[in-house]
Image (spheres, rainbow, N blue to C red):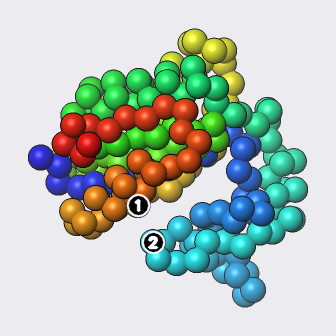
């Protein structure tokens, strides 16, 4: 049984830059110059900002990544393998061309950054091995702790209802 549940999300490298017109989740500078988190549940997303987009694009070290179906299947298989190896409960995962979502249950209360890092790093190793070495993911991602079972159920539903899914997984418990 999991002690904690997380909704983890990350985008592929360069496919959804900070300041993008689709809005984004992240940290921005307020009018006073202070950092303002735009990644807290129930708070508004950060608004589009063309200067941020240009700045991010200029810092890119490679081409933007859009996953193919074959690559998305490899990512999903690796998520399942990594979760089993780490003794995590992968409730659901969806991999789209430019991002993924996963709901993961864990024992104890590990750092959320560790969970997201492990999913992305093992998926990157597999993608590098099978499709060539490159930068696959954005630097971080969204890590939302799910406080109770209704929140887990809502997150599972959210992931299952994604559009444009190339590969998906739902455990029997959450099917």
- Measured along the vertical axis of the image, is residue 112 above or below residue 40? above
Direction top: furthest residue: 130
Rendering coords of residue 15 (x, y %): 72, 44
Indicate whether 28 appears above or below 75. below
Q: Earlier in the sequence, mark 2 or mark 1?
A: 2
User: Can you give x and y, in whole percent of width and height, for residue 138 in the image?
Assistant: 63, 44
- Tell me residue 37's x, y (percent): 57, 73
- Do tag 2 and tag 1 residues touch (Cβ < 8 Å)? yes
Lateral position of residue 53 relative to residue 143, left or right? right
Q: Residue at x 72, y 73 (%)?
A: 47
Kindly identify the residue that appears in the image at 76 percent across and 60 percent down: 20
What residue would you read off at disc 1? 144
> Where is 77 relative to 156, above or below?
above
> For this rendering, which residue is in front, 34 or 154?
154
Tell whether 129 sits left or right of 113.
right
- Crowding near the residue tagged with mark 1, few <14, some 14–19, many ≥20 C-alpha atoms within 10 Å: some
- Callout 1 secondary element: strand
Residue 70 as seen in the image, left or right of residue 52: left
Asked which secondary structure carries label 2, the reply is: loop
Mark 2: few/some/many CA within 10 Å (<14, 14-19, 20+): few
Which residue is at 65% across, 63% downward? 24
Instruction: State whether residue 34 appears in this view.
Output: yes
Work out whether residue 75 can be spotted: no
Quadrant hosting residue 124: top right
Label annotation for residue 12: none
Residue position for label 2? 41
Image x and y of residue 88, in percent = 25, 38
């Amino acid at each position: 049984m999991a002690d904690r549940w997380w909704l983890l999300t990350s985008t592929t490298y360069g496919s959804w830059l900070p300041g993008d017109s689709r809005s984004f989740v992240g940290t921005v500078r307020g009018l006073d110059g202070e950092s303002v988190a735009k990644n807290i549940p129930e708070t508004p997303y950060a608004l589009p900002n063309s200067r941020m987009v240009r700045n991010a694009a200029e810092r890119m070290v490679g081409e933007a990544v859009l996953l193919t179906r074959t690559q998305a299947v490899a990512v999903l298989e690796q998520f399942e393998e990594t979760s089993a190896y780490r003794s995590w409960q992968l409730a659901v995962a969806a991999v789209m061309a430019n991002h993924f979502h996963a709901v993961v249950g864990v024992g104890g209360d590990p750092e959320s950054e560790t969970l997201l890092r492990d999913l992305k790093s093992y998926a990157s190793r597999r993608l590098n091995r099978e499709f060539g070495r490159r930068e696959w993911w954005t630097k971080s991602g969204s890590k939302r702790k799910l406080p109770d079972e209704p929140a887990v159920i809502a997150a599972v539903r959210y992931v299952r209802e994604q559009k444009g899914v190339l590969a998906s997984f739902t455990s029997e418990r959450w099917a």
